[in-house]
Amino acid sequence: MTYVDLNPVRAGIADSIESSDHTSVQVRAEELRIDPGKADEPIQPIAGVRLGLDMLKDKAFARLAMSNRQYIELVDFTGRQLRPSKRGKIDEREPTALSKLGLDANYWTAHVKGVGSGYWRFVASVEALEAKAAEWKRQWLKGIGYARRLVTG
C-alpha cells in the first residue's frame, strides 16, 4: 500500500502526501484534517466495505493492525528516504504530514516511554488492548489506561 501511495512522489510529480493526487494516503490525510478524532482508529479500506469495531475484532475480518495516524506517519517517513532508482522524495525541510494535520508528533515517543511502566505484555492502541483482553476473557490488561491517556492528552 505504501509503495503505491508513494508512486506520485517517487515519479517526481508530487512533493508531499497532500499533493499526491488519487492516492489513499491523500484521502486518509484529508479525512483526518476534517475529523482529527479518527487518527487512532484502525485503518479502514478507502473503497468497499468499512468494518465496525466488532468486525475488526473478529479474526475472519482481520486487517492490518495499524491506525490512520500510524499509516500516514509510515508513508511520510518512507517518502523521505532517498531511493537511487527513483526521481523524487519528500523534502526533509517539508513539515511532517502529522504536524501539518495538527497531530502530536511525540506520540511514538510516549508509547516507547510506556514500555515496562505503562504497558506490560502489549504496546498497542486502546482498541487493540481491549480486543486482546476480550480474547483472553479478561476485563482489562495493564496498559489500557496508559494508552487512553496518550489519546486524550
Image (cartoon, helix red, strand yellow):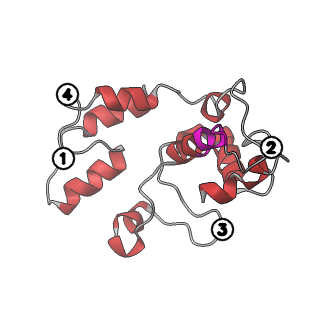
Residue at the spot of label 3 = 47
User: Residue at image x 22%, y 36%?
Assistant: 119
Q: Which residues are magenta?
A: 75-82
Determine crowd level at label 4: few under 14, some 14-19, many 20+ residues with C-alpha closer than 10 A.
few
Residue at the spot of label 4 = 117
Of the residues under marks 3 and 4, which one precedes in the sequence? 3
Of the residues under marks 1 and 2, which one precedes in the sequence? 2
Marks 3 and 4 sit apart, C-alpha to C-alpha, by 39 Å
Instruction: Classify residue 2 as left or right of residue 141.
Output: right
Of the residues under marks 1 and 4, which one precedes in the sequence? 4
Residue 39 locus on image (x, y percent): 53, 42
Establish if 94 lies above or below 68: above
Of the residues under marks 1 and 3, which one precedes in the sequence? 3
Residue at the spot of label 1 = 140
- Numbered disc in front, either 1 or 4: 4
Considering the numbered disc 2 on the image, is that residue within a helix, a strand or a loop?
loop
User: Residue at image x 56%, y 40%?
Assistant: 73
Residue at the spot of label 2 = 19
User: Is residue 103 magenta-colored?
Assistant: no
Discs 1, 4 touching: Cβ within 8 Å: no
Q: Is residue 91 visible?
A: yes
Considering the numbered disc 1 on the image, is that residue within a helix, a strand or a loop?
loop
Residue 35 locus on image (x, y percent): 62, 41
Of the residues under marks 2 and 3, which one precedes in the sequence? 2
Discs 1, 3 touching: Cβ within 8 Å: no
Marks 1 and 2 sit apart, C-alpha to C-alpha, by 42 Å
Q: Amino acid at mark 4?
A: Ser
Figure quadrant of the N terminus: bottom right
Q: Amino acid at mark 3?
A: Ala
